[in-house]
Amino acid sequence: MVSAFILTSMAILGFTTILGTFTNCVIVSVNLVEKVKGKNLGSSDLILVTLGLSNITFQFVMVANDFLSLLWSDLYYSDEVYATFNALLFLPVYASFWFTVCLCVYYCLQIVIFTNPFLVRLKSQISKLVPCLLVTTVLISVAISVPAIWSTYREFSTESILVNQSFESNVPKLKISYLLPSNIIGCSIPLFLVGIANGLIIKSLATNKRNLENITSKTINPRAEARERAARTVGWLLVLYLLFYTSEIMMFVDLFPPGSIGFCICLMVIYIYSPAQSVILILGSPKLKKAMYVFFQLFQHWNNKKIDNPKILFIKLQIANFNCK
């Protein structure tokens, strides 16, 4: 008999998977349409594409992981399957964290005015460095996630075997010698860097705002609006990152027993991470917001049976991309 907790978890996971897959596919497809049309992707667009792809991968791996663990636990908790799924889960999560760092650092370099010669040069060369940074991010993520395969162990004791050890106490676990360094490199350092970028952006915007107030200029500056939009994006990404990071740590250390309220909250935060991040990225990009508006309009028209020709989707997407230039 399947418990109510399992049914609820599967339902929420299914909903967040559909939502996360759709929103991340919008991010990827809108930018790839421009690439197909012969236009070069900007540095921020390239980072958004890689973030979308990593989130889609994470979403599907998480679905396979959770459904297998809930429905076929005997198979899932075998040493080989459990170790493999740990590595497959860590890879897109760590990659997503470092891609987020790349995006936040890029926004920081575009917004903040630096006087340090190294940072000035880095700011001028960042567009050329972004592809190399993304490749390096993938390599780092692979290097710290693959060792999870041979870092799995089981706790056996003579006393627990004699008293008919429970299944929960016999599940595989990851060695602390792997979890600690991988968590520092894959989660803690990216969180620290995102926090620094967020702080520098807020400080820069506050200084610029005071300067504008002194000038008493009331004209709308598109560049200032773009900076504030980027700052909001980085701020929300930091909040989401903190929530996910805290929930992940609580799950790893088994702070809450399975099925408890705390456990369910942590699980829900992990489930909504990918769709929430994609929504933040979409709201922070006028081009992606316009594309989402077109998608919703088309869905509404199709629902009302007002559109007979599917080719109108491509035409409206082209118009949306043109209007966002």
Image (cartoon, rainbow, N blue to C red):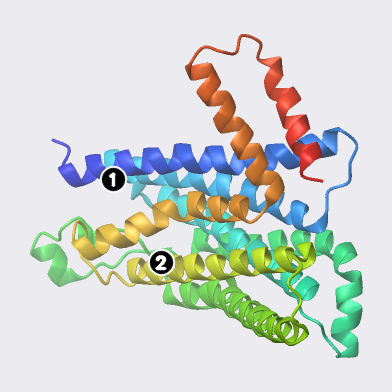
Instruction: Name the residue at 34% across, 66% down.
Output: 251
> In the displayed image of the protein, which residue is found farthest to the bottom?
116
Would you say 241 lies left or right of 166 here? right
Q: List the single residue furthest toward the left.
A: 163
> Is 280 drawn above or below residue 187 in the view shown?
above
Residue lying at 74% horizontally and 69% vertically, measured from the top left: 224
Q: Residue tagged by mark 2? A: 248
- The residue drawn where x is 77% and y is 44% is 324
Front-lying residue, 148 or 288:
288
Image label count: 2
Distance between mark 1 and mark 2 Cα atoms: 17 Å
Which amino acid, by three-letter code, is at mark 2? Glu
What's the residue type where badge 1 is placed? Ser
For image coordinates 60% across by 13% down, the residue present is 307
Q: Which residue is mark 1?
A: 9
Quarter where residue 111 is shown: bottom right
Residue nearest the viewer, comparing 107 with 28: 107
Instruction: Determine the residue located farthest toward the top in the rendered image.
Output: 308
- Give the side of residue 265 with respect to residue 226, left or right: left
Q: Nearer the viewer, residue 79 or 28?
A: 28
